[in-house]
Image (cartoon, rainbow, N blue to C red):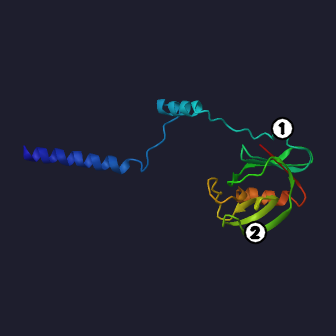
């Protein structure tokens, strides 16, 4: 009987080891169509989350310009034909400019942002109360902390989007900020 019990324990131990060895390191997501996945989707929809539009905002000016939508955290680079050649999401800092029309006042190939992060392709369009507002890309790819105590006006882009902004936004170009 002792031999049979030992053998049974050995088989159970081996099966437990085998199951652990073939299990994924991380739990998998629910498959589409499963009850869990549908429940999560419904919860997300019920929470009021909706896909943000990438359409150029109405009443965002005319002509060649950069459009920055504060609420959507999105930028459009608009050509002479009135159509956006590129749009992308941005990461704003704690301070935001008031809605209105500004112009690109300066550009800087690189440096250190007001938040202490190494940046490139800086395009400045406004300054108010000691806060400088401009688009830039962090060299390390980071985005600003919107809850930081220090009021900075950095509007961060990915490095690829920062390059596109740099090539597009020349001095004196319009920057239209909408709510």
Marking on residue 37: none
* Mark 1, residue position: 58
- The part of the image, by quadrant, that contains residue 107 is bottom right
- Where residue 120 appears, x then y in whole percent? 74, 65
Q: Earlier in the sequence, mark 1 or mark 2?
A: 1
- Say above or below: 135 vs 45: below
Residue beneath the point at 85% across and 57% down: 169
Quarter holding the C terminus is: top right
Q: Nearer the viewer, residue 164 or 144?
A: 144
Would you call the spot at circle 1 few (<14 residues within 10 Å), some (14-19), or many (20 or more)? few
Q: Residue at position x 23%, y 45% from top?
A: 12
* Rendered residue at 27%/46% (across/down): 15
- Name, please, the residue furthest toward the front: 129
Residue under circle 2?
110
Q: Secondary structure at mark 2?
A: strand
Q: In the depicted view, which residue is nearer to us: 166 or 70? A: 70
Q: Is residue 15 left or right of residue 138?
A: left
Task: Residue at the far bottom: name it.
Answer: 111
Q: Residues within 10 Å of mark 2 (few under 14, many from 20)?
A: some
Q: Left or right: 1 with respect to 132?
A: left
Q: Position of residue 131 (x, y in %)?
A: 75, 60
Q: CA distance from mark 1 to mark 2?
A: 33 Å
């Amino acid at each position: 009987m002792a031999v049979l019990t030992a053998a049974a324990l050995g088989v159970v131990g081996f099966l437990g080891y085998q199951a652990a060895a073939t299990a994924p390191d991380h739990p998998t997501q629910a498959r589409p169509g499963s009850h869990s996945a549908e429940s999560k989707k419904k919860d997300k929809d019920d929470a009021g989350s909706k896909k943000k539009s990438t359409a150029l905002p109405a009443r965002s000016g005319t002509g060649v310009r950069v459009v920055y939508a504060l609420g959507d955290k999105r930028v459009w680079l608009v050509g002479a034909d009135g159509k956006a050649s590129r749009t992308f999401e941005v990461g704003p800092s704690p301070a935001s400019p008031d809605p209105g029309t500004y112009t690109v006042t300066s550009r800087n190939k690189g440096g250190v942002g007001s938040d202490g992060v190494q940046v490139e392709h800086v395009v400045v369009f406004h300054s108010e109360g000691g806060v400088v507002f401009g688009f830039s890309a962090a060299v390390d790819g980071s985005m600003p902390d919107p809850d930081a105590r220090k009021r900075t006006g950095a509007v961060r882009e990915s490095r690829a989007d920062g390059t596109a902004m740099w090539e597009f936004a020349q001095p004196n170009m319009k920057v239209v900020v909408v709510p």
